[in-house]
């Protein structure tokens, strides 16, 4: 089934190019904001708890994990399996391919904000072990996602940033988010077409379970929600 995984790689590389654009936006915001943006290497306050990512992000994380030393990979997967076991106490039926959309939204879209559990991909030095392959949400988090048009995709901002002002009013933080998210959706539909044989708009997982998904073969019938 290596051919299935290989078919996904070109889509993942194009997604990485899109994510690089997001990094450029964030770096530009930092450059123009100076000390008002506190995000930086070793700051890992937001790398805790559980939040959902797309299966395309999950596939990319696995590419990054595969580049780590074998001993580090083993340790990360052990952390992921420990987290999965904790989740299965509450959700006994939560199994491969670990897609959250099979469950009622209220079970996973409102995760506790005070969960201190570190991301399994967080190094002992507070740095991401797969930084170049991290998900979209990890790149946009910390600053509001406000489109040039005024449309707001997220008004969340790290409390360490812009402590003396309202970031929603800062013009240089705005960006063409709608265009970027439309491109992300188009790539996700290509990804699911290549993996499942049909395009999907939304299939999500958590970062720990993302590392345990088998992308070498499509899920069995009934393991995914209906289109």
Image (spheres, grey):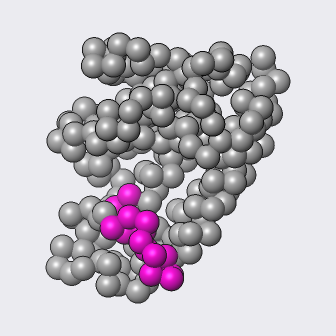
Q: Quadrant of residue 190?
A: top right
Quarter that holds the C terminus:
top right
Total marks shown come to 0
Q: In the picture provided, is 68 more to the left or to the right than 167?
A: right
Q: Position of residue 142 (x, y in %)?
A: 34, 61
| Bounds of the magenta segment | 141-155
Whether residue 124 is visible to the viewer of this picture, yes or no, is no
Residue at image position (66%, 24%) is: 215
Whether residue 128 is situated above or below residue 7 in the rendered picture: below
Q: Quadrant of residue 169?
A: bottom left
Q: Position of residue 211 (x, y in %)?
A: 51, 26
The answer to if 143 sits in the magenta stretch is: yes
Residue at image position (47%, 16%) is: 95
The answer to if 131 sits in the magenta stretch is: no
Whether residue 110 is situated above or below residue 81 in the rendered picture: below
Residue at image position (65%, 16%) is: 220
């Amino acid at each position: 089934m290596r051919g299935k995984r290989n078919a996904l790689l070109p889509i993942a590389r194009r997604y990485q190019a899109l994510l690089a654009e997001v990094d450029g936006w964030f770096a530009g915001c930092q450059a123009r904001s100076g000390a008002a943006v506190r995000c930086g290497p070793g700051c890992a306050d937001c790398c805790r708890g559980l939040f959902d990512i797309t299966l395309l992000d999950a596939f990319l994380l696995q590419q990054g994990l595969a580049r780590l030393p074998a001993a580090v990979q083993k340790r990360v997967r052990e952390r992921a399996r420990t987290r999965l076991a904790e989740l299965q106490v509450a959700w006994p039926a939560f199994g491969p391919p670990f897609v959250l959309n099979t469950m009622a939204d209220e079970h996973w879209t409102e995760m506790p904000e005070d969960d201190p559990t570190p991301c399994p991909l967080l190094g002992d030095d507070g740095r991401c072990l797969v930084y170049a392959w991290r998900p979209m949400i990890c790149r946009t988090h910390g600053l509001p996602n406000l489109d040039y048009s005024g449309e707001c995709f997220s008004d969340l901002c790290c409390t360490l940033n812009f402590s003396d002002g309202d970031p929603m009013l800062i013009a240089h933080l705005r960006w063409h988010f709608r265009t970027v998210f439309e491109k992300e959706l188009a790539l996700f539909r290509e990804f699911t077409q290549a993996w499942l044989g049909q395009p999907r708009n939304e299939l999500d997982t958590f970062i720990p379970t993302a590392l345990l998904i088998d992308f070498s073969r499509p899920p069995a019938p009934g393991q995914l929600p209906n289109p």
